[in-house]
Amino acid sequence: MFGNSSPVQSNQAGPHHHLVRQLERHRHSPFLKPALDHNRIAFEASVAAWKAQGNLPLIIDAGCGVGSSTLHLSKTFPDHFVIGIDQSADRLSRHRPPDDHGNHVCVRADLVDYWRLMQAAGIRPARQYVLYPNPWPKAAHLGRRWHGHPVFPTIVELGGYFECRSNWHIYIQECAQTLHRLGAGSIEVERLEALVPITPFERKYLASGHSLWRCTAQLP
């Protein structure tokens, strides 16, 4: 069941030739779309849960799916508070936290709104994780990849340690290039070896024999 994932197929042989131009357009064009009410409510509820734990250093698990990575991060960093965010009610309904929720919470929200609400509230996470986002591998879909989306400069402005994982090397290369252009430091791209999977996608890709890649950086 977990070993039947096809490798990413793309009409790109390397990083997109419009990547820098796209980024510069986003940097100089304000993203003015208003946040929807249900995203604002989810944001406020999750921030209240964090503050109730004493304003611990904050970790954002963006696109947390069923929340297994959120739970893993909460155990790995017991002195932090982890907020997992996903837009799928179905995926989040399968999250099974322990009786003691402890230092994490999962909420349903659109990430584009959530990141911008964090910025507006002046909240600066200590760590941000984007684990196995949809790669949108067609060249025409560059704008749907997080590093090609208008919200990406906001993600970088939030600061902290940043980590993205993917089973498509080009996605990680593009992410690193964009981070460099936005002034991030200590950027590293590496292949993940001897990995204990922390998400269902990671488990499936490993079982299917895919190479897994990671980009890490310290955001300015």
Image (cartoon, rainbow, N blue to C red):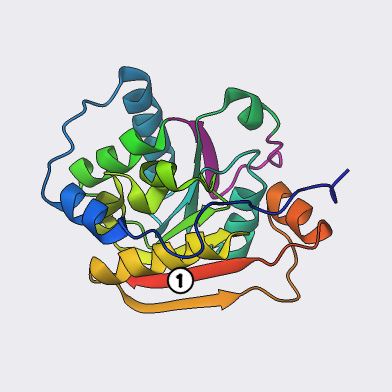
How far from the left and from the top, in percent, is residue 10? Answer: 56, 51
In this view, which residue lies farthest toward the top? Answer: 37
Quarter of the image for residue 180 reads bottom left
Q: Main secondary structure of the magenta part?
A: loop
Q: Is residue 127 above or below residue 100?
A: below
174 on left or right of 170? left
Is residue 101 located in the magenta-colored stretch of the structure? yes
Q: Quadrant of the C terminus?
A: bottom left
Q: Quadrant of the N terminus?
A: top right
Name the one closer to the observer, 66 or 177: 177
What is the three-letter code of the residue carrying label 1? Thr
How far from the left and from the top, in percent, is residue 182? Answer: 23, 65
Please tell me how crowded label 1 is: few (under 14), some (14-19), or many (20+) other residues with Cα within 10 Å.
many
Quarter of the image for residue 106 reads top right
Query: Does the rendering let one see residue 86?
Result: yes
Q: Which residue is mark 1?
A: 216
113 on left or right of 85? left
How far from the left and from the top, in percent, is residue 128? Answer: 43, 58
Numbered range of the magenta stretch: 95-109
Residue shown at 61%/39% (left/top)? 65
